[in-house]
Amino acid sequence: MSPLTPATPPAPGAPPAPATPIRLAVVDDDPLVRAGLTLMLGGRDDVVVVAEAADGDEVAAMVAMHAPDVVLMDLRMPRLDGLAATEQLLARPDPPQVIVLTTFDADEHVLRALRAGAAGFLLKDTPPPQILDAVRRVAAGEATLSPTVTRRLIDHVTVGGAGPDRRREQARQRLAQLSDRELEVARALGQGLTNAELGTALHLSTATVKAYVSRLLTRLDLGNRVQVALLVHDADLDRP
């Protein structure tokens, strides 16, 4: 680590530091943004920037060559945008986690990326410690999206039409296959609870919580916790 780059301590409730550094890739068509993110995130003991790409059409080869754990993905790029690149990447076997980067916090492309399996999204003006915390959380398998942000996204892009009603019914049909306890866990994920908070709320050990989350992903055929939260939001089961 550079002596000019002080270590950033984990945020309260953050997952423990990994045994090996998190391998991070940065995808953005703006070289200044790439340089800034690489400089900001690459000088940590637990994060190493292994690759950069300037457009979505470079992502597949980059991932195949460098095997990052987490990809920071710009959504708006000239040749292949971040949405298409994210959908292609997450359709691969054993893909990395993806955090999408955007200048907008209520954009249909963001929601589509999350539905495709992105683990969260960040605004480009997010303070550096929060970006670093998001990378750490996603690498540890935790969500980086608050239920408030999810609800605002869904409400923004589904105003009018019959779409929301169909989506609500479809989501409720999928969730109907769960046991009462599994549905409790799914609703807790929809409320943005961490594993520790979920364990406290439902009187479960952390190991049991992780087992329930894994079972939910398998039964619902979803890739991560954010997709479970989105399904709960679609079913309108996340409100008190």
Image: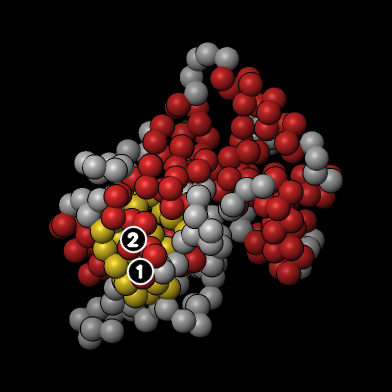
Numbered mark located on residue 61 in the image:
2
In which quadrant of the rendered view does residue 82 lie? top left
Residue 184 visible, this angle = no
Tell me whether circle 2 and circle 1 mark residues in contact (CB < 8 Å): yes
Q: Name the residue rendered at 30%, 60% in the picture.
A: 26
Q: How many marks?
A: 2
Q: Tell me: residue 185, above or below residue 6.
A: above
- Colouring of the image: secondary structure
Q: Where is residue 147 shown, x and y percent of the image? A: 55, 43
Separation of residues labelled 2 and 1 (CA atoms): 6 Å
Percent x, y of residue 17:
49, 77
Q: Quadrant of the C terminus?
A: top right
Q: Is residue 16 visible?
A: yes
Question: Can you give x and y, in whole percent of width and height, for residue 23 in the image?
Answer: 39, 72
Name the kind of residue labelled 2 in the image. Ala
The amino acid at mark 1 is Met
Q: Is residue 4 left or right of residue 149?
A: left
Q: What label does residue 186 carry, if any? A: none
